Amino acid sequence: MASNSQVASDSAPESLPPESMEEDESSGIPGIANPMRAVAVVGTFLPRRCGIATFSTDLSLALCTEFPDLDCLAVAMNDGSQNYAYPERVRFELREGDVACYRRAADFLNVNAVDAVSLQHEYGIFGGKCGVHVLALLRELRMPVVTTLHTILPEPSDEQRVVMDQIVQKSARLVVMSLRGAALLQEVHHVPAEKIDVIPHGITPAATGRRSKQRLGVQGRTVLFTFGLLSPDKGIESVIDALPEIVRAIPDVLYVVLGETHPHVKAEHGESYRLALQSRAKRLRVGEQVVFHNRFVLQQELAEFMSAADIYVTPYLKAEQSTSGTLAYAVGSGKVVISTPYAYARELLGDQRGVIVPWRNPAAIAHEVIELCKDDVKRRNMGMRAASYGSNMLWPQVARQYNESFSRARAEHAQRQRSVFELKTIDRQPLDLPDPDLRHVRQMTDSTGMLQHSRFNVPRYQDGYCVDDNARALLLMTLLDDAGAQEAEIVRSLALRYLAFVSHAFNEATGRFRNFMSYDRSWLEPTGSEDSQGRCVWALGCVIGRSNDPGRQSLAGVLFQRALQGTGTFTSPRAWAFVLLGIAEYLRAFRGDSNVEQQRQLLAERLLDLYRRTHGDDWRWFEDSCTYENARLSQAMLSSGALSNDQEMLKAGFDSLHWLLSVHELDEGDFAPVGSNSFYRRGGPKARFDQQPLDAWAMISACLEAHRISGEQYWAEHARRAFGWFLGQNHLQQALYDAATGGCRDGLHADRINQNQGAESTLSFQLALLEMRALDLLPSLSSHGSKT
């Protein structure tokens, strides 16, 4: 970490009084003092190698240059464990997977009296699924946020839509770089036009001069040029495929591809794309006409390449691409450009400022290159029109437009602050959720898998392992990986270990999972319980539905299909429920699998029939007793009813869960699950103790499922109440969660807490926490009909 950047602090500052507002008539904007004193740009920054980093760095420099009295500080997004030698302007570094760090960044900006925040948004640079972690920052900021949207999707997924809708809601103004981007914001996210500023992508024009070709060693050559981080969506192969025809007409042609492989692509696939392109050029016998410069270049060197280019080519394959810094730079430099018809190119190259060719059409590229090289007048006029259009994109002009947007956002924010006041009672305050903490999970895990029990927080080797806990642990790691975990490599490593244990537990001869294993790795039984089978099917379905790892997904798929076969003969309602939850996860990836759909319908109907036969006016339940993990039955009904749009199932799920909440509540309103000492039998007394973490997690999951389906806040509030049980909202007013270890104590007795921190309890808490954090970040996901 650079020594000149702020180290994230664990201590939050005290609330500061609002700044006094003055009216400066010279600004033309009522209610705000002018000029701006401090602006923070949040995004990636050089020397991190990505397009957003270049943009954020250039924007910061332009603002400081154009407004010398403005303090333009930066908050830099770091990827993984990478550390960068940032310039002095970077005052705070954000770890993309650490949600707490986003909140500390907000504290830092609030304390430093920043007037406005300029957020550079791209889905891939912020942590969490679809970049959801950035919402933790936005919710804590006390100054207006102006968000620059570098990508606007015409058909976002449900999760992408909700994240973007939240960003739109939390932003005072939104900056897009094209008219098409503004139209998409209005069409897809229903943003009012008056909230949108269209500001072009800033550029620094390329140096001109005849010596660039000589300095680069390409004198006497006709240079085609493509620049940017290399990835398969760049379409470079289309230009290479066009080269044989171009070479026949223009023998001195040279195609220069400048840029290293995108870091994310390189981490996952290595240099396979670049190597494939090189092999393609050799196969087409144009290897001598293609030069790859595999490095990330800064402005001065890029300017030299751009000056030497005769034609700039962007053969990109993403139709929805709403910005391209490289295309903006080429146009502003007066280069003749040939491009595929992605949205930004159609707008920038209109009115004969460039040439548009069809997607994946080497023949069209060849034709246009040859025609342009033959027609000097056409090429010169096209370059002049491009340069004239690009004169409005120079960084000084762009910086002034951004400053106007900041000032307007500040004025509008001040007006809202004067008119809005909300009183929050204690009951309406959100829970202060702890951060995920895998210390005790890792402490309970060895090279075999997760151990069952502990004495206090010390693992008990003599109790060995069970597949139940390893299935839960696999579920936790899969959900953490899907959500964008803080320690991704650790999470994935643990996921592999737990999946290996579950795989080893599967008995091919019986089609069933064994459950208990001694510490010397000897199985203690040939077949586990039906519930164990159901929990394994649930975890495996989650891996299939959510994992991006082909190996994990493939192995889970094989085990899931084999383990599912015998579940139709099960008699345990909870086993049915676990299997149904696993099927729901599986169908996220393979909706339409008729065999799995048939099994889902069979088990769901069986559970519904149980409810029909058992429930009454005063006992709206599936059985004549409430025992353990009760809420899973309601959750399975809700999940299955939503998948099949079966209103009777949905009603049974909602009614049974509503009744169960009344059973699980003390007179004071605190959550109190049915105790494990004799449980609760119809017509008999309800056991109050021992209360188990597993039941609290089940209730949280079921309530959140009800919230996702119905959108009713009633269910979210009850999920929060159940989670509060872990944190001390119980009859003893003592926390079961141990913040010192990351573990969870094993239960609540009448007079004390069970101080042991076993696997089941710890996993129940961490899984419940993960679900609650998803609710905290995306409270409105249900309104879009999405299931997570």
Image (spheres, rainbow, N blue to C red):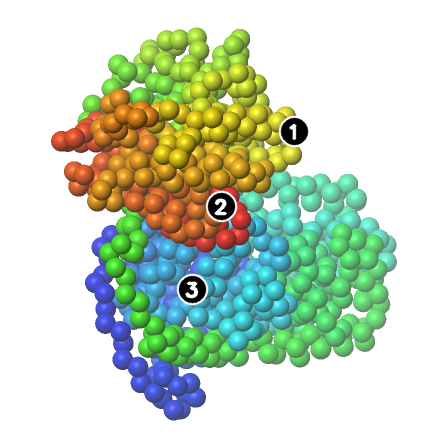
Tell me which label, 1 or 2, sits earlier in the chain. Answer: 1
The residue carrying pointer 3 sits among few (fewer than 14), some (14 to 19) or many (20 or more) residues within 10 Å by Cα, namely some
Residue at 43% of width from left, 51% of height from top? 712
Badge 1 amino acid = Ser
Tell me which label, 2 or 3, sits earlier in the chain. Answer: 3
Residue that badge 2 annotates: 709
Tell me the distance, in whole angstroms, between the alpha carbons under discs 1 and 2: 24 Å
Badge 2 amino acid = Ile
Total numbered circles: 3
Depth check, front residue: 191 or 398? 191
Task: Tell me where residue 121 appears, x and y as whole percent.
Answer: 49, 60
Q: Is residue 417 left or right of residue 43?
A: left
Element under disc 1: helix
Residue that badge 1 annotates: 594
Tell me the distance, in whole angstroms, between the alpha carbons under discs 3 and 1: 43 Å
Depth check, front residue: 689 or 296? 689
The residue carrying pointer 1 sits among few (fewer than 14), some (14 to 19) or many (20 or more) residues within 10 Å by Cα, namely few
Element under disc 2: helix
Can the viewer see residue 451? yes
